[in-house]
């Protein structure tokens, strides 16, 4: 009886049911997409950093896990000290420069040292860096920007010759000669980070201890753990932003359910009076409205999950470099958040309905 009553109530006002379900869908999609976008970007960035193939990353004191926040205060000659350490095979200084027009980090590299650490690029078109104005672009960025080898590409108010298109996964999506980038950004003989390759992976801890002894206060990180470090809890302000967006989504869902169920109670005053006249007690009325709210929430959750995948597909089609990671864990969390918000939003209207006087309800017009 309860199930049939809920179904009929939802079908009786299809537009109201649709609006309520879409409000929940927006809540669920907002949570899933915000978390999916941040975790996807962090995960994808970390995988590209690990793909460089180095064992150790040396940064200035107090540096963030997010390389975009790093500057270039380290002298390049530090690389000579690192190369002299025991069990160090090769060292590659890299200068980072944030390209605001493309929202990306450009790597300034020394061709030989970066090849020694990373194993070199896999070329799809063109050749390696040869001239001071050459630039390498990975395949994903080349597709997004519609770039071909041999063309001219302008960033940092400078015209570059696209020497080659390389396979993605070596840290950045754009690579330029280190010396040229140093001159352009006023960081002569400076580097943002040093990537260190050990003679054997098992020597990583020993080399890190030696680096800490030679360069105290500098930040030394093993790249094999970089993926686990790139989480929202380790990025300043990111977790606060995610929590704020989740609270916004909860507020949207709660208000939608509250307005929907409040309107339901007002419209069904006579129906509630009939139910109570037939022997329905307070708890039956409360349970009926809360169950209807939960059913509406389940419809919204299903629509929200579908909406999340549709929006993700649209974003990836428009921006191929974006990574939005939708996980079953966060889908379930978003569903739980929506259900909790629905129950809270429907509680007052349900209580208000259960308190209605039978005579007043039956005489309501």
Image (cartoon, helix red, strand yellow):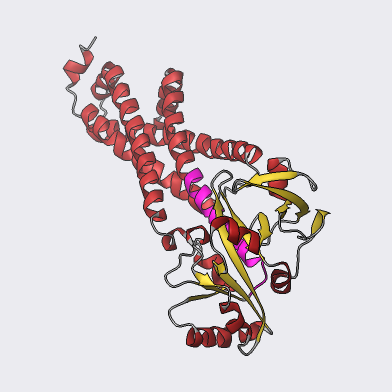
Q: Is residue 108 above or below residue 162?
A: below
* Residue 49 colored in magenta in the image: yes
The magenta span reads 32-54
Number of numbered discs overlaid on the protein picture: 0
Predominant secondary structure in magenta?
helix
The residue lying at 43 percent from left, 24 percent from top is 19
Q: Is residue 297 above or below residue 83?
A: above
16 in relation to 29, above or below: above
The location of residue 12, given as percent across then percent down, is 43, 18
Depth check: 74 or 193 in front? 74
Is residue 44 visible to the viewer in this orientation of the structure? Answer: no
With 215 as the anchor, is 174 left or right in this view? right
Q: Is residue 67 left or right of residue 345?
A: right
Which residue shows up at 75% across the image and 70% down it?
119
Quarter of the figure that contains the C terminus:
top left
What residue lies at 57% left-to-right and 88% top-to-bottom?
Answer: 206
Image quarter where the N terminus lies is top left
């Amino acid at each position: 009886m309860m199930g049939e009553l809920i179904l009929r109530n939802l079908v009786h006002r299809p537009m109201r049911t649709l609006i309520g379900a879409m409000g929940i869908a927006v809540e669920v999609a907002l949570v899933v997409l915000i978390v999916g976008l941040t975790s996807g970007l962090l995960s994808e960035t970390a995988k590209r950093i690990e793909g460089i193939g180095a064992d150790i990353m040396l940064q200035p004191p107090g540096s963030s896990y997010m390389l975009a926040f790093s500057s270039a205060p380290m002298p390049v000659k530090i690389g000579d000290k690192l190369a002299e350490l025991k069990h160090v095979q090769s060292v590659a200084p890299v200068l980072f420069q944030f390209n605001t027009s493309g929202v990306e980090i450009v790597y300034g590299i020394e061709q030989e040292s970066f090849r020694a650490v990373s194993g070199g690029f896999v070329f799809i078109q063109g050749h390696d860096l040869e001239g001071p104005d050459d630039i390498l672009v990975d395949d994903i960025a080349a597709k997004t920007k519609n770039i071909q080898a041999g063309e001219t590409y302008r960033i940092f108010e400078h015209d570059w010759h696209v020497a080659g298109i390389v396979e993605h996964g070596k840290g950045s999506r754009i690579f330029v000669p280190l010396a040229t980038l140093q001159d352009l950004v006023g960081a002569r003989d400076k580097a943002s980070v040093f990537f260190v390759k050990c003679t054997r992976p098992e020597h990583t801890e020993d080399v890190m201890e030696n680096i800490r002894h030679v360069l105290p206060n500098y930040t030394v990180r093993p790249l094999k753990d970089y993926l686990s470090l790139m989480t929202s809890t380790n990025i300043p302000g990111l977790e606060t932003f995610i929590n704020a967006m989740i609270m916004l989504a909860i507020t949207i869902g709660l208000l939608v359910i509250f307005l929907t169920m409040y309107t339901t109670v007002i419209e069904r005053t006579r129906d509630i009076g009939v139910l109570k006249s037939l022997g329905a007690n307070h708890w039956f009325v409360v349970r009926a409205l809360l169950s209807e709210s939960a059913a509406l929430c389940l419809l919204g959750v299903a629509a929200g999950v579908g909406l999340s995948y549709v929006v993700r597909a649209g974003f990836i089609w428009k921006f191929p470099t974006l990574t939005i990671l939708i996980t079953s864990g966060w889908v379930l969390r978003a569903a739980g958040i929506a259900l909790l918000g629905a129950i809270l939003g429907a509680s007052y209207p349900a209580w208000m309905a259960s308190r209605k006087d039978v005579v007043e309800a039956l005489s309501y017009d």
